[in-house]
Amino acid sequence: MSDYIKRDDVIDILLSDKVDMSPAFVGVANVLGNLAQFEVYNDACDNHIDLVNKLPASNVVELKIGKWLQKQIRGDTYPVCSVCLSQAWDEENYCPNCGARMEE
């Protein structure tokens, strides 16, 4: 089974990893002689963001997980989905209304 991640989460991580090029930082980096290294690093982060944006999107549906609740109606007990609260006739492995996978 494949793992799926949110594109925006990856981009947020890459953006947070970039070096803050504020004037004060640039001044210190110039004095130390390593400004070019930070510029190259930030360019690499930008290139990675571009690559992430070029990846094709997958058609993924978030998995809903629920459990069967018991509801009394006119003396009879029926299973009710904990996700969508719809009534079902039998306790299946999934809800026939919302598709939630049922766990014990």
Image (tube, rainbow, N blue to C red):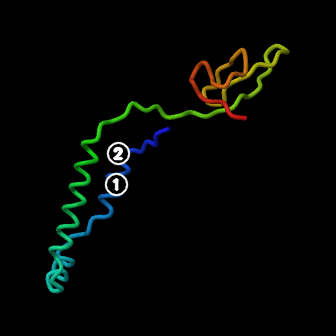
Q: Nearer the viewer, residue 66 or 93?
A: 93
Q: Left or right: 50 with respect to 16?
A: left
Mark number, residue 71: none
Closest to the camera, between mark 2 and mark 1, is: 2
Residue drawn 73% across and 28% down? 69
Circle 2 Cα neighbour tier, 10 Å, few/some/many (<14 / 14–19 / ≥20): few
Label 2, secondary structure: give it: helix
Location of mark 1 (residue): 12
The mark that comes first in sequence, 2 or 1, is: 2
* The C terminus sits in image quarter: top right
Q: Left or right: 89 with respect to 22?
A: right
Residue drawn 19% across and 73% down? 37
Residue drawn 22% across and 49% down? 50
Label 1, secondary structure: give it: helix
- Distance of label 2 from label 1 (alpha carbons): 9 Å
Q: Quadrant of residue 22?
A: bottom left
Mark number, residue 7: 2
Provide residue 54's location: percent of width, then percent of height. 24, 42
Q: Quadrant of residue 74?
A: top right
Q: Left or right: 93 with respect to 47?
A: right
Q: Left or right: 17 with respect to 1?
A: left
Toward the bottom, the furthest residue is 31
